Image (cartoon, rainbow, N blue to C red):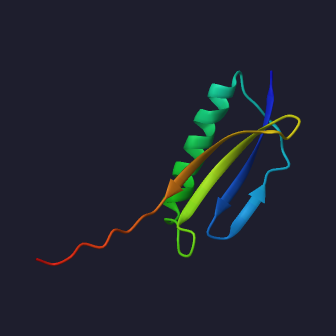
Amino acid sequence: MPKFYFQLFDRDGAGTTETAYDFESIEAAKAEARRVLAEMATEGLPAAPLNIMSVELFDESRRPLAEVRLILEEIAKQPR
């Protein structure tokens, strides 16, 4: 079974997991990255100045495969 690593980026900065996780496919690992990102968002939305949080997925050789991002964007509207 292939092994994958995750790097999390949130309001506190980046953190790489040192533990390899086994998934049946890259699609299963991507689904887990999405689930982790959703869980991170429940603890608080991204904050300025970057307004982003992400989970990056790496293969067992630590080569980047994909990144799932949540970007918070505020759009000002002009009063009428």
The N terminus, quarter of image: top right
In front of the other: 31 or 57: 57
Give the answer, above or below, for where 12 lies relative to 31. below
Q: Would residue 48 appear left or right of 80 to someone viewing this image?
A: right
Where residue 22 sits in the image (x, y, percent)?
77, 30
Q: What residue is rendered at 45% in x and 63% in y?
A: 72
In front of the other: 53 or 23: 53
Where residue 24 sits in the image (x, y, percent)?
71, 21
In front of the other: 64 or 43: 64
Which image quarter: residue 14?
A: bottom right
Which image quarter: residue 31?
A: top right
Q: What residue is rendered at 63% in x and 28% in y?
A: 28
The residue positioned farthest toward the left in the image shown: 80
Give the answer, above or below, for where 34 lies relative to 23. below
Where residue 69 sits in the image (x, y, percent)?
56, 51
How many labels were placed on the picture? 0
